[in-house]
Image (tube, rainbow, N blue to C red):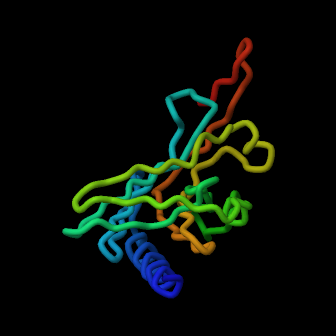
Amino acid sequence: AISSMRNIMASVLLAVIASACGDDDPSGPSSNVDGLRLEAQVAQLTSGSAFFSAVVTVTNTTGVSITRNLSLACPIGIQLLAVQGGASVYDESERECGATTNAVTIAAGQSVTLTSGTRYIPTLLETVSPNTYRARALVRFEAGDIALVEAGTFRLPACRAEGIGTTCD
């Protein structure tokens, strides 16, 4: 099962890299691997919000149910890379998520939506400058395998304190 999952992850990685070449669609490209289509987007929760997240839709394109084990603590992570040159500016791939997994079964032709949970932009701005970045979602499968799913671009906004809250442009 682990060998099979590693083969799936290698296929996901190759398909994601191949599908990402030359694609500037902000909604992110999709990847089709072993009966699963993965689509990702990284975005602010609402306009002006100080929070953002990654959302991955996993669609079963086969005629049978597919079960995958995902990290229970943090199934989806985020990476931000410089648009020019691809240098990593923010990377959750090394985040410790624990070994506990959750089996997710996707019926034939159905989809599940996974989220990273919210991230607070002002905390990120302590180490990363406001700019537009290439975004990736990290789908954490069992045994530490991570599928990188291109998620288009994400504009990290500047933020300012307003009253008792924070507004990000």
How many numbered discs, if any?
A: 0
Q: Residue at x 64, y 53 (%)?
A: 73
Which residue is situated farthest in the top direction here? Answer: 163
Would you place residue 32 above or below residue 75 in this image? below
Residue 114 percent location from the top left of the image? 47, 51
Is 163 left or right of 24, judged from the image as shown?
right
Q: Residue at x 73, y 45 (%)?
A: 124
The residue lying toward the viewer, choosing from 141 and 47, is: 141
Residue 144 percent location from the top left of the image? 63, 72
Which residue is situated farthest in the right direction here? Answer: 126
Would you place residue 51 above or below residue 103 in this image? above
Residue 56 percent location from the top left of the image? 44, 54
Is 146 left or right of 105, judged from the image as shown?
right
Residue 52 percent location from the top left of the image? 58, 40
The image quarter containing residue 76 is bottom right
Q: Quadrant of the C terminus?
A: top right
